[in-house]
Amino acid sequence: MSISVASILLIALRLSAVLAVPDVTVVPLRTDDCVDWPNWLRTQDSDTTGGFDIQVDQCDDEGLEGLLTTTIAFDWTDSGGDSGERLVIDLRKSRRFARYYYRCWNGTVRYGTNLESIITIAKDSRNAFLTAKNTIEGYKLEPYAHEINGTRQPGVFLGTMNRTTWGFTYVQPTECGQKDYYEVKLQGLPVDPDTEPRAANNPEFFGFLKALAI
């Protein structure tokens, strides 16, 4: 049984439509408190949430869908840059592995109960990674809603400056015992006048990051 060229093209178009990152309207949520983050705790004495994961959502590589974050250390101080920890996408999907979780406290996202580990977005427009314990101040991580054709989509999406699309690039281990992962960085940020952009890998895939209550 033969398949026509037209049929092959139609299948390809359908696949691309399914896998393409949807065109969304980005709606800013409140950033001066934790009310719009998942798992908000309604208390009189504090502004905080319970724990939540950060996971890949609506990526144009369906193999990344639902994967969660882990961290790796980085150090660019030898060339005048920053150092700290970078959030990356863990390829191990099983919940058996220890997971990083986050919470909002006084309007700022942090690691679990470590109030000093603030999660920010690097100001390097080519390498706008999610970072923690960074030696150079980054952009504030902000919550957003998404709408498609006027319909609010479920979930709280991550970004800053009204950008919520993230690029993903596979990184192979360079030494025995290291794990592979996907680096993830925010797309479309303007060049910060005080931060010289570094060379960067081009993303292989695009998608969103979503905060999910645990």
Image (cartoon, rainbow, N blue to C red):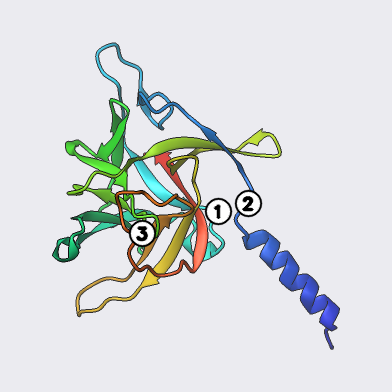
Residue under label 1: 58
Q: Is residue 196 above or below residue 53?
A: below
Q: Nearer the viewer, residue 130 or 199?
A: 199
87 relative position to 24: left or right = left
Q: Is residue 31 above or below residue 57?
A: above
Q: Residue at x 63, y 60 (%)?
A: 20
Residue under label 3: 127
83 relative position to 51: left or right = left
Relative image position of residue 25 (x, y in whole percent): 61, 40
Q: Residue at x 74, y 65 (%)?
A: 14
Q: Nearer the viewer, residue 125 or 164?
A: 125
Marks 2 and 1: CB-CB under 8 Å? yes
In space, the residues marked 2 and 1 are separated at their CA atoms by 8 Å
In space, the residues marked 1 and 3 are separated at their CA atoms by 21 Å
In the picture, which quadrant includes the C terminus?
top left
- Secondary structure at numbered mark 2: loop
- Tag nearer the camera, 1 or 3: 3
| Label disc, if present, on residue 22 of the rendered structure | 2
- Secondary structure at numbered mark 1: loop
